[in-house]
Amino acid sequence: MKRTLSLAQRLALAFLGLVAAVLVVNGSISMWFAYREATEAAVRVEQEKADAAAERVGQFIAELEQQIGWTTRADWARVPIEQRRYDFIRLLRQAPAITEALFVDGQGREQLRLSRLEPDVLASGADLSADARFRGTREGRVWYGPVTFRRGSEPYMALAMAHAGRNPGATIAEVNLKLIWEVIAGIRVGGSGYAFVTDTAGRLIAHPDMSLVLRETDLSALPQVADAIAGRDERVQTARTLSGQSVLSAHATIPRLGWIVFVEQPTSEALAPVYATAYQTLALLGLGVVLALLAGVVLARRLTGPIRALQAGAERLGQGDLTQRIEVSAGDEIGTLALRFNEMAGRIQDAQETLEAKVADRTRELSQSLEELRNAQDRLLQTEKLASLGQLTAGIAHEIKNPLNFVNNFAELSVELLAELRAAMEQAGLDPALRAELEELCAMLSDNLAKVTAHGKRADSIVRNMLAHSREGGGERRRVDVNALLEETLGLAWHGARAERPGFNVTIEKRLDANVGELDLFPQEFARVLLNLFGNAFHAVQQKHTPGFQPHVLVATHATPASVAVTIRDNGTGIPEAVRSHIFEPFFTTKPPGQGTGLGLSLSHDIVVQQHGGQIAVATEPGAWTEFTITLPRRPQPQDRAA
Amino acid sequence: MKRRALLATPLLAAAPATRGALAQPRPARLPRLGMISAASADDPVAFVHLRRYLAALGWRHGETLHIEERHGNGEPGVSPRLAAEIVATQPDVIVVTGSTEARAAQQATRRIPIVFLQVVDPVALGLVASLARPGGNVTGAAASGQMLWGKRLELLAELLPPERRRLAVLTNPTNPAHARNLTDIAEQAPRLEFSARVLPLARPSDMPAVLAEAAREHAMLVPHDFILFPARRRVVAFAAEARLPAVYENRFSPEVGGMASYGADLRENYRQGAQYVDRLLRGARVEDLPVVQPNRVELVINMAAVTALGLNAPPMLLARAEEVIE
């Protein structure tokens, strides 16, 4: 799993990296230039030192030549031998490097030899005409012999100079080159640099460490010496000494002699300014990195502080704390972000509150709908129950109707037969007592038959009512003015009630909505419903006997675009709770036996619901009021009455 | 790569310097230097100079260096004993002031570096294989690469009239240089028509008798020797008293009244020796240190002595002299 860095760390790292990169690039470039510059300066200095050293070594030889020059004058050949010897003595006194001085005449005969080691030899006449030293002067005025190491240790060189004049002799000097040490040791190159001289073969002639010279050290294996002998152009290079130390080496060739003067300085010293610059750059780099680190941390803290606040706020918001607001005072993007965040939180809070209200509303509506649905279901159950009861009733009535017809018909026939019996008895002229007894029996039979007929008619009426349950839309269906029908049936009911009870009085209030207009109805059937309801209302107010009671019946219609509602309200006895659920059942009645069949409301329910597709509802307050409301749809529901 | 090598060099360069600096204050065990001289302890010219030059190089007895000295006081045959004693002290370097001591030290140890002083022609003496490559544990500063008795005889020849050609040659037969000196003198003397009488001086006590003998000759040659050198004042005084022109090997005798000398300035010799001791103490190897020779030989004339002897120094001679002591 890769460890993820925090934003602050990444910011700090990015800042650090950027600054470090800039510093490194800058430092490298400046270091490179400083290195180049210092190297070039060091090289220049080395080169100048080498030239100067070569100049001084050359000067050493030139001085020797100058001193020997005293003995090469044209007139020197003519001076007495003692004078010549004296001149040689002076030469040896003045030039400590000359160990031996010889004068050879034009024929190559040795005339004079002075040495620091041997007794002087005058006019030995030794033949040196074949000697390289003498022969050298025949070709050029000055001849430099090769460097030799006496007894394998001290470097010597023969320096021969031809004299001036005709048939000139020559002065030959054996020069102890060890004395160049004083020149070489005097050359300072920086703090610990030094110079040394080699001959053309790379053998060491002079070196501050004399012991190297005395050991006849051959330096031709050193690359810088080999390069110098080969005459390469590169006169300054980094090289190593015999002991392996790294040095910046420059060389210069001494003209005529061909010797090479090397000037070497430890690279560490020669390039000290470079190191100084490098250390300075490194120190600046380090300082810069530290500053960048500090600045990066501070900046990252300052940057990420608000972001952390934002994050914390978001977390609390995520945990549901909608009242959370972020305190960010910064006016930058993060401040704006925090502002937007706060706005968002506010909106979410608002939205949630609205949502809760809506949910509450919907829940309420849903529970209401559920309630309505339950009611509808109850009603549907009731309707189904009532419908099946109605069918049962109709079936029973149908079965009863034929026997009842027989009873009624034969009762009527029996009445006629009784009248025929009376007439027959008149003609038979029977004993008056018997006749009276028969007359009495006939009267009783007649009474009985009248009762059979009367009750038969009543039973027939009941059966007919019962049969009404099974009737399909009795009568015709047509457009009917509901308000007019209402007025008409109300008048009929009122007169019916007055006829039944002459002292009956009731206040009738009518609130008929003119917008009700016409509806598609079965007028006879609907009138039955209305009559039934009015009858019940009048009956209810008659049953109430509380003091100061004013019977009151309200008839109202109310039109809506989809339906028409008819309300009949009385302030009568109301319907007790135990009764209310049964009122639409057939044969249920609260009236005394004989006064109601218990089929009125049952039939009304059947007519409104089954035939007209409406609804009939009751509301009541026992002992206070009862209100029936019929609601009829403006467009009649399709008749789907089951067979 | 090159730059990294350059960067690395300051450390490398600094390393030897620190080692040198650390080497000096080492109280636990100071570097030890053994010094052997067959000469008298009364006038230790070589050691006095050596100590001075060593001090200039940072080696001071008791502070940075422990010096053990042995003196033979001119007695013959004691050098091997002195050398054995010095080797027993386990010195880091041994300094000897002449051929006698050098031979004795060389016999005593083949391991401890030996630096000789004041030796003439160490190759001929068998101390080293060659000047450039000593080849053993012995190296040092030669007083001269070769014998210079010819020049000294020439000097006498210039000063003395031609009839005065009899020479007394003082010599210490116990000194290994003795034979070489005599050979050179015997070879050079006839060329300048000198006859030489060799006067052996084997022990300091023989001095009066030998000097008495020398007084009978025209002139005297006095080599640099572990008996003669410490007694140089006495020899010079005798020569003056006996009006005997004498030539010495180096300037120490004319400085105290001797007539003349021809040879290297031994102070340079001591300085070179001190430098070699220094380098050896700092870890150099003998094989890296070739025998070093003097840069110059000098003619020193004590004009007062010459005049006192009733001699005339010709201009030619004076012109040649590096120093003329009035």
Image (cartoon, grey):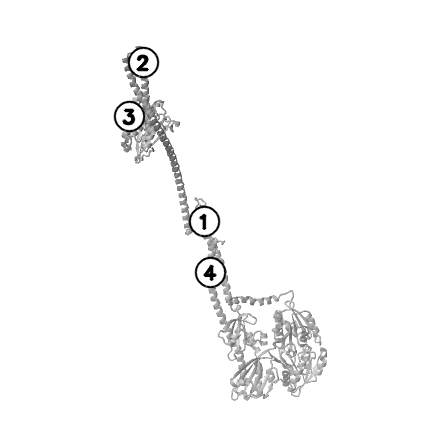
Q: Amino acid at mark 4?
A: Ala
- Check disc 3 and report the residue beneath it: A492
Q: Secondary structure at mark 1?
A: helix
Label located before the other in sequence (2 or 4): 4
Q: Nearer the viewer, mark 2 or mark 4?
A: 2
- Check disc 1 and report the residue beneath it: A311
Q: Secondary structure at mark 3?
A: helix
Q: CA distance from mark 2 to mark 4?
A: 149 Å
Same-chain status of marks 2 and 4: yes
Q: Are marks 4 and 3 in contact (CB under 8 Å)?
A: no
Q: Are marks 1 and 3 in contact (CB under 8 Å)?
A: no
Label located before the other in sequence (1 or 4): 4
| Residue B181 horizontal side relative to residue A297, left or right | right
- Check disc 2 and report the residue beneath it: A438
Q: Amino acid at mark 3?
A: Leu
Q: Amino acid at mark 1?
A: Gln
- Provide the chain ID for the residue under circle 4: A
A74 shown above or below B250: below
Q: Nearer the viewer, mark 1 or mark 2?
A: 2
In the rendered image, the quadrant that contains the C terminus of chain A is: top left
Q: Based on the displayed image, in which of its 4 quarters is residue B253 positioned?
A: bottom right
Q: For residue A21, which numbered disc appears in the image? A: 4
A131 shown above or below A276: below
Label located before the other in sequence (1 or 2): 1
- Provide the chain ID for the residue under circle 1: A
A474 shown above or below B205: above
The answer to whether residue B179 is seen in the rendering is yes
Q: CA distance from mark 1 to mark 2?
A: 120 Å
Label located before the other in sequence (2 or 3): 2
Q: CA distance from mark 2 to mark 3?
A: 46 Å
Residue at image location 32% in from the left, 19% down from the top: A451
